[in-house]
Amino acid sequence: MKKFLTFLTFLSIILSSVSKVHSIEADIFVQSTVNRASEALNDKFSKEEKIEKLKEIASETVDIKGIGFYTLGAYRKSISDDQIKQYETLFKQYFLKSFTSRLAEYSNPEIEVVSKKKLNENYTMVTSILVSTEQRPKVKIDWRVYTKNSENPLIRDLIIEGLSLARTQKEEFSSIIQSNDGDINALFSTLKEFVK
């Protein structure tokens, strides 16, 4: 019995150390993500190949569903389940196209992670710098990372020189809906048009 308890203790120590190995620090996660994106943007790939690689990276590292719900704001509570499903599908298509088409124009962007700050149990802010070149100045980029599940952190927002992309998107979507008398279908039409 004593040997069995010793074995259980030993096993629990091993399992706890294994689980710690799988925990990913937010700053390492962000640096790994930007390194993957930088490799995907290598000039050896065609624009179409770059876009496909970036879509794959975004699908794995960004909380597209969470960002989508955030950008829909209060309207999420006033639409049907079917409309929610339709919005999820459209937003994912919109996000991936918008994200990849912008980034695909870059060639090997160099981003350096400089610090991280744990905001609370769910979020960590990672600060990075897009290194300047002859064509562009240095740009500060903050990454709001959802870290509730330390084994699977996800990007929830990018704040570029103090401007939140998620908040900007939310304001744009709200403006579309409000200017069409609160009709969510106006937003759906705009998203469909974009992803054509």
Image (spheres, grey):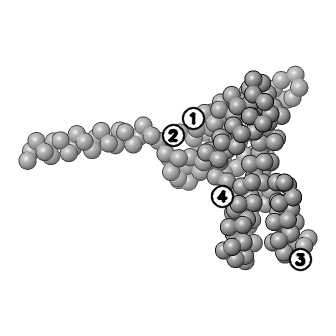
Which dot marks residue 65?
4
The answer to whether residue 57 is left or right of residue 106 is: left
Amino acid type, label 2: Ile
In which quarter of the view is residue 14 placed? top left
N-terminal-most mark, 4 or 2 = 2
- Disc 4 from disc 3: Cα separation: 25 Å
Q: Are marks 2 and 1 in contact (CB under 8 Å)?
A: yes
Q: Tell me the amino acid under the disc marked 3.
A: Asp
The residue carrying mark 2 is: 24
Q: Would you say the residues marked 2 and 3 are in contact, meaning their CB atoms lie under 8 Å apart? A: no
Q: CA distance from mark 2 to mark 1?
A: 7 Å
Under tag 4, what secondary structure?
helix
Q: Amino acid at mark 4?
A: Lys
Identify the residue under disc 3. Answer: 181
Residue at numbered disc 1: 28
The residue tagged with tag 1: helix, strand or loop? helix
Q: Position of residue 110 (x, y in %)?
A: 73, 27
Comparing marks 2 and 3, which lies closer to the viewer? Answer: 3
| Number of other residues with Cα within 10 Å of mark 2, as a class: few under 14, some 14 to 19, many 20 or more | some
> At which x and y percent is residue 178?
87, 71
Instruction: Say which mark, if any, is on residue 54.
Output: none
Among the two numbered marks 2 and 3 on one chain, the one whose residue lies closer to the N terminus: 2
Residue at 83%, 60% (x, y): give it.
192
**Residue at (81, 42) in percent of width and height:** 101
Left or right of 35 on screen, residue 21: left
Q: Few, some or many C-alpha atoms within 10 Å of disc 3 (few <14, some 14-19, many ≥20)?
A: few
Which quadrant would the C terminus be assigned to in this image?
Answer: bottom right
Looking at the picture, tell me which residue is in the foreground, 47 or 125: 47
In-image side of 11 versus 52 (left or right) = left
In this rendering, would 133 be left or right of 115? right
What type is the residue that disc 1 sits on?
A: Ile
Q: Nearer the viewer, mark 1 or mark 4?
A: 4
